[in-house]
Image: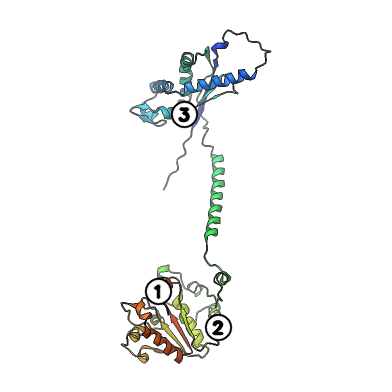
Amino acid sequence: MSKFLISLRYESYTTMYVKNNNSAGADVNPNANVDLNDLNTAKSLAATYITVLKSQSVMEQVGERLQEKYTVEELSGYFIVRNKKISLNSLSNSFTMSSVDGTEVIKITANTLNPAVSADLCNIMADIAPSFLIRIVGAGSVEIIDVARPVEKPVSPNIPLTTVIGIIIGFSVSVLIVLLVDYFDDTIKEGEELTDRFNKAMLGEVEELESDIPGSKKKKKKETGRQRKVLLTDDNIPFHIVESYKSIRSNILFSLGTTSKRVIAVSSPNPSEGKSTSASNIAIALAQTGSRVLLIDADLRKPVQHKTFKVSNSEGLSTLIIQRSDFDSSVKKNVATNLDLLPSGPMPPNPSELLVSDQFRSIIEKVSSEYEFVVIDTPPSTSSATQW
């Protein structure tokens, strides 16, 4: 379990008036107007006083005085301590000094994790400041107006404000991420997008099968691709899935109506995307019209059609190409009504070379003249350079 630590910080302040030595003996007329030069002079002197008080010499004395009141172990929780001395930078960063309304009144604020330490810092600074300002700047006198006291109410973080800001930033970042993802997302989500992008007619759409089968459970992606295939001949296949494949069949019949050789290759970009299931179901749908159909399993690396139709794979396309078997012994007749299957056969060492060979082309020429439709289950397109 992770822990989130909020560090509460406490402020104390003191104010002091630094009287300019040049005006020490001057008569002060309360009715006199303060001109612009007086204001500029006051601002310039205040900036000088602050610069002096932020110097390393002053910080060294502040650190020494502070270490007289606290141990090094105590101070290490509030400042950076090196060689048993407080780092001057961390000590200086604890102070904030400013002129009050452009006058020679200096407000010194200390911000630490301990209210007592914050008050002590201010009072130590107010105690040692006069000697430095009188000696270095030549100030007439320095009078302490407010003595610093520990304030138990933390000044930061402002939890309600921080929470609101966090919610706003989180919401804004979430919206930005969503917009960026949507902007760079070029995936196809609707069939019409596919048609518009590639200017090709779409034969049909089929929803994911596994989630539609009654009583079926979703499996890991690695397992679903090679598990039991859902066929149109199954009793429990949903009606809308059957209608989807029948719609694809109608579009295929319409598209290939004037073609004498009706060879259909079914592929997909990646493995386990339903390519083999679609190939077998398209073949079954075409066979249900009374046409003689041959289904060829050309995925020689990872064949599945022999498992789908529960036939032997000892002979098939690979043995037929290298002429170690004849066509009649390689083809499995009537795996479904009007449907024959040419399984892949034993996996060869060079599947890509077999599929681009002249012998494979001759087999396709032969079967396309003997069957009304030939459906080929091809390897995934991203894992094979096969061409016909």
Q: Secondary structure at mark 1?
A: loop
Q: Amino acid at mark 3?
A: Ser
> Where does the image place residue 256, in percent across and percent down from the top left?
53, 85
Which circle, 3 or 2, is nearer the viewer?
A: 2
Q: Residues within 10 Å of mark 3 (few under 14, many from 20)?
A: some
The residue that mark 3 highlights is: 94
Residue 103 in view of the camera: no
Q: Amino acid at mark 2?
A: Ser
Residue at 33 percent across and 28 percent down: it is 83
Q: Residues within 10 Å of mark 2 (few under 14, many from 20)?
A: few
Q: Residues within 10 Å of mark 1 (few under 14, many from 20)?
A: few
Residue at 57 percent across and 69 percent down: it is 193
Residue in front for this viewpoint, 219 or 290: 290
Q: Amino acid at mark 1?
A: Ala
Which circle, 3 or 1, is nearer the viewer?
A: 1
37 is higher (above) or lower (below) than 334:
above
Residue in front for this viewpoint, 239 or 177: 177
Nearer the N terminus, badge 2 or badge 1?
A: 2
> Where does the image place residue 384, in percent across and percent down from the top left?
39, 73
Which circle, 2 or 1, is nearer the viewer?
A: 1
Residue in front for this viewpoint, 117 or 292: 292
> Where does the image place residue 99, in percent across and percent down from the top left?
56, 23
Q: Quadrant of the C terminus?
A: bottom left
Q: CA distance from mark 3 to mark 1?
A: 68 Å
Q: Secondary structure at mark 3?
A: loop
